[in-house]
Structure formats: structure tokens, C-alpha cells
Image: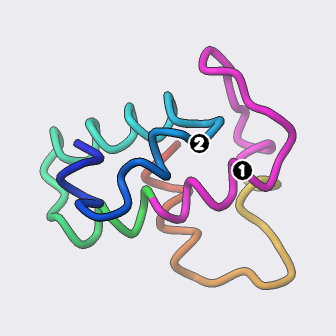
Amino acid sequence: MLTTLFPRFHQRYLDSPVADWLVGFADWLVAVGYAHDPAHDHVRRLKQVLEAREPVTSDAMFSAAELTTIFTSARQQPLFRGTQRAFA
């Protein structure tokens, strides 16, 4: 699904240390009916926040408090909250 959402830059996502999360999230977004542009934006934002953290294993579990911390920053944009809700 990453090749569909990111035709020119999908390799950046596949080479990411959080690629398993990105692939799974992208597949889920499309499976539940998200349109291309919103799915693209959510996956891009998830990549940003997960790569900014310590390494995240593919079998990690996130609590609601951890997700709030992950998706909060000084430069927080409201769109990241939407991605947080979709990812949760």
C-alpha cells in the first residue's frame, strides 16, 4: 500500500526503522475506507512522530498516555490529533 500512497517516495517509508508500523497502518487505513489523500497524510505524520522517538519495535503496545506524549510537541498541529485518533 505504501507504493500506492507514496509512488515516488515509498522506499523512504520502507527503509524507515518503523516501516512495519507504517505498512500496517497504511493497509488498515485503506481497508477501512480512508481516501488516498487522508491516508497519505496520516501515514506521513505517523512516520514523523515515531521516528522522532526511541526505536519502536513492531510488537510494541502503546497506552493512551504514551500516544498523547508521542503526538504532542511544541510545534503540534491539530492534524496530528486526527492521526493520533486514527492510529489509536
Task: Give residue 51's mark.
Answer: 1
**Amino acid type, residue under disc 1 in the picture:** Glu
x then y, percent, for residue 61: 67, 22
Q: In this view, does 21 lie to the left or right of 65?
A: left
**Amino acid type, residue under disc 2 in the picture:** Ser
Q: In this view, does 23 lie to the left or right of 20?
A: left
Q: In this view, does 84 lie to the left or right of 6?
A: right
Q: Residue at x 49, y 28 (%)?
A: 20
Residue stretch in magenta: 44-67
SS for dot 2: loop
Q: Residue at x 83, y 47 (%)?
A: 53
Depth check: give the residue in front, 4 or 38. Answer: 4
Q: Residue at x 87, y 39 (%)?
A: 54
x then y, percent, for residue 51: 72, 50
Task: Give residue 29's mark.
Answer: none
Q: Quick check: marks 2 and 1 in contact, CB under 8 Å?
A: yes
x then y, percent, for residue 4: 17, 53
Residue named by callout 2? 16
Against 68, residue 40 (above or below) is: below
Q: Quick one: quadrant of the N terminus? A: top left
Against 38, residue 57 (above or below) is: above
SS for dot 1: helix
Judge whether residue 61 is colored magenta: yes
Q: Is residue 34 left or right of residue 50?
A: left
